[in-house]
Image: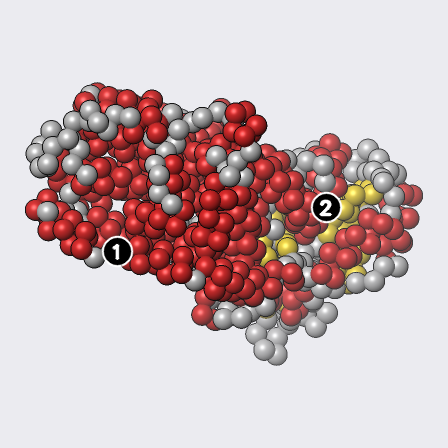
Amino acid sequence: MATFLYKLGRTAFRRRRLVALLWVALLALAGVGAATAPAATSSSFSIPGTEAQRAFDLLEERFPGAGADGATARIVFKAPDGGSMNDAAPKAVVEETVAALKSGSDQIVSVTDPYTAQAVSRDGSTAYVSVAYKVNGMELTDETREALTQAGHAAQGKGLTVEVGGDALQTMPETGAGEIVGVVIAGIVLVITFGSLVAAGLPLLTAIIGVGIGVSTITALANVLDLGSTTSTLAMMIGLAVGIDYALFIVSRYRSELADGRTKEEAAGRATGTAGSAVVFAGLTVVIALVGLAVVNIPMLTKMGFAAAGTVVIAVLIALTLIPALLGFAGDKVIGRKQRKGTEEAAKAAKPNAGTRWARFVIRRPVFVLLAGVLGLGAIAIPAASLEMGLPDDGVKPVSATERRAYDLLSDGFGPGFNGPLLVVVDGDKAAAEKTVTTIKRLDGIAAVTPATPNKAGDAAMITVIPKDRPSSGATETLVHDIRDATGDDVLVTGATAMNIDFSQKMNDALVPYLALVVGLAFVLLTVVFRSILVPLKAALGFLLSVVAALGAVVAVFQWGWLGSLFGVEQTGPIMSMMPIFMVGVVFGLAMDYEVFLVTRMREAYVHGERPGEAIVTGFRHSARVVTAAAVIMIAVFSGFIGMSDQMIKMIGFGLAVAVLFDAFVVRMAIVPAVLALLGHKAWWLPKWLDRALPNVDVEGEGLAAQDATADRKPDLVKA
């Protein structure tokens, strides 16, 4: 592989104008496709195989046009102190609001009058209007949302406290600011790393081009493939991350080859052949992790995974072709002024860099470093044993949000269970429905049960059950299971709360198979790359340690509330059910990036004759600086999302940031060299039968080493 990529890099360097033109043409083509494609809608969210989904399907069949899986909203009214919502003036305000809502959008299925629907609290202090829509929250038009908020605002100025809640207000979080901050920090880190604005700009430029092509393609194909408006979110995050990383490593290796005296074309070829080989296999591990999301069997996640994997493939292709082409355009500007004069290299020859000094320290005290790293991460991982998964509701939003204030008003006026009613669907006649109501009323944890509402045909009915506790509580989850156990197979429980419970269970059930698939395939891949059994095993175990430690930190902050005020956590609750699998998929890819780039250089030195300890030092001397820079960039990008008000985005940003911190700086920089130092030659052991069976992909560039005697070398850095 190294020889093929070497030739590819030299070809791209020589024909740089053609290569650059092709990528610009692809970007333009994707951009035109995205601009002319119909606006993407939100693909329908479904969880195949769950009771909540079967209930939704039954509702759509037996109650056509009812918008069973549509968005809902509640406008909550609270009378002033000493007043009552049953007074004439508040009644008039509510009636005006109901009328305004009914005429405000054609996406509305129904608007309930609180005075006829018994939606006034017993003390008369609080009332609410329920609004049901034909489509889910992401498919509502801006005009529909505006009509909802305007109705609430109009009522606010008439002496009442009015707040609006429900998933009808759900919108895609604005992440632009976090991404901009991340790119700016990435630029600063790259300038410090390379000492050259041109060298720092290349990874940013190519990453943006790759993300632009990937996201534009997703947008262009959204309607054809039913991708939906949320599919590009993960693709953008991962594409930006790996795009910067892959370009960073190839540019760094190119500068190293130039420092060895090679001509620019030769340096570009060798950088692509060696670092490029690592890029290919690092990219494959990320693709495996993302495509593996299909194991969960949730269509939305599967589409997100495949779309993000496509963006990673684009990032790999750009790193192997566009980067060598742009290096040809950059000339010697990719080298800092000091390095061009030779003073920097002379200083480096006289004084070991930080990576070298750290590697020598670890080699001298491997047992101490290993124990400190493992015990430290193990201690942080302890809270993960108490992990409770669910989907956060409006109760975890900041108090500045109207959804949170509406949630609190409903809890105070009616009880916390009114924020998460359960919808029970009976597949049967009136007698079956009445029997179900009687059975449910006997259960514990119920605040109210409405009479059954039959369909026109009389062969199905809907029953609303109000739990005593809040939607995300363990008691409400127990109630859902109790209803399902107490009723027959013809009775199904659904609604947003039940759907969240089933979603969390499905994610929990899929975690072990997903881990087995991703780690297993990556183990095979890394065995081929490193020609070793113990190195891939150590890589996988180290990754699991860092992910569990990161989950422990997430539980401590967002579930237990430790240091919650520091990170803006106003209300603790269950950890988002997608979090473990999401962290495994994203962090595994980045962790294997760092593993491949760091250990490949060690393997390369070992294959070329260095002793195990010397190979570790060589790997750190050449790779520690750029791996550190890549990790700092990723931590900065993910940390930018911690400051957002949305609890789910905040949790994702925090979890990914600490996971990269633990994996890059504790596992890869400390535990990995300590384990390799203790193993010595055994680290690179591979049974002879397996060595013969595995393909030789030549990641270390052994085929290129034979060319050293005839390589075209020049002592100075003259423009090519």
Is residue 157 visible in the rendered image? The answer is no
- Which residue sits at x=8%, y=34%? 718
Residue drawn at the location 85% of the way across and 59% of the way down? 443
Residue 353 circle label: 1
Does residue 425 appear in the picture of this structure? yes
Which quarter of the figure is the C terminus placed in?
Answer: top left
Q: How many marks?
A: 2
Where residue 464 sits: x, y (%)?
Answer: 76, 51
Q: Amino acid at mark 2?
A: Thr
Measure the C-alpha gap from mark 2 to mark 1. Answer: 60 Å
Is 413 situated above or below 511? below
Crowding at label 1, few (<14), some or many (≥20) Cα neighbours within 10 Å?
some
Q: Nearer the viewer, mark 2 or mark 1?
A: 1
The one of 265 and 72 positioned closer to us in this rendering: 265
Where is residue 613 drawn, in percent x and y?
Answer: 39, 50
Residue 136: name its quadrant. top right
42 vs 280, nearest the viewer: 280
Side (left or right) of 467 relative to 651: right
For this view, does 565 lie left or right of residue 424?
Answer: left
Amino acid carrying mark 1 in the image: Asn
Q: What kind of element bears circle 2? A: strand
Identify the residue position indicated by label 2 in the image. 494
Image point 59% across, 78% down: which residue? 81
On the image, the x and y values in percent for residue 270 come to: 27, 31
Element at badge 1? Answer: loop
